[in-house]
Image (tube, rainbow, N blue to C red):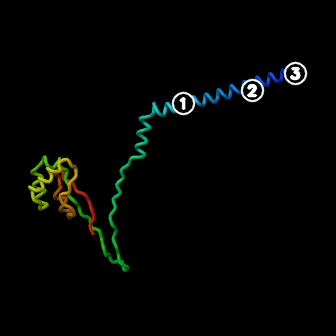
Amino acid sequence: MKAAVDKQAANQSEFFAIRHYLVLGLILCLFAALIGRAYYLQIVDQAFLADQGKQRQIRTIQTPAYRGAIFDRYGSPLAISTPVDSVWVNPGEILLNLDALKSVVKKLDLNYRSTVAMLKEKADKEFIYLKRQLEPEMARSVAEGIRGVYLQREYNR
C-alpha cells in the first residue's frame, strides 16, 4: 500500500512539475510576444505611427463666422453685416515690383513714399494691411493679378 501511495505521490509531483514548467513556458512566450510587439511598434513602425499621430492631433481648421442680422419684433432688419475686403501685402513680394506697388498705392489713395518706407521698414514681415474695409469691387480691382497683394474678407455693420 505504501508503494502505491509513493507511486501516486511521485506521479502527482511529476504532474505538478510539468504543469509548473508548462505555465512558466506559456508566461515566457507571452512576455516574448509582448516584447516583440513593443519592438515592432517602437522601432520598425515608428515613422508611420508618428505620422498617423500628427495627422490625428495637428489640424488647422478655419471656421469663418460673421455676425448675423438683427431683426426687430416685426421682422425688419435693424443691423446687417455687409461684406468688405481688406487689402494686405507681403512686403518681400511687393517690393520686388515697384511699378505694381505704385498703381496699388494710387488706387488706394495712399502716399507712395510713406508706404514704401513703411514696407521697407517691415520687410521681414509677411503680412501688412494697406487699407481695410474697402468695397469688394474696389478691392478686387486693386489686387487683380498683382503678386504680393492679397484680399481678406471681413464684415462690417
Q: Which residue is mark 2?
A: 16
**Rendering coords of residue 125 (x, y %):** 21, 49
**In the rendering, at what x and y percent does residue 63 appear?**
35, 57
How far apart are the two marked residues, 3 and 2, measured between alpha carbons? 18 Å
Relative to 14, say whether 153 is above or below: below
Task: State the SS at label 2.
Answer: helix
Which is nearer the eye, 138 or 60? Answer: 60
First along the sequence among labels 1 and 3: 3
The vertical placement of 156 against 45, above or below, is below
- Occupied quadrant, residue 110: bottom left
Quarter of the figure with residue 27? top right
Amino acid on which disc 3 is placed: Ala
Tell me the element at label 1: helix
Task: Give the Cα distance between marks 2 and 1.
Answer: 28 Å
Left or right position of 63 against 85: right
The residue under label 1 is 35
Residue 4 circle label = 3
On screen, residue 32 versus residue 93, left or right, reads right
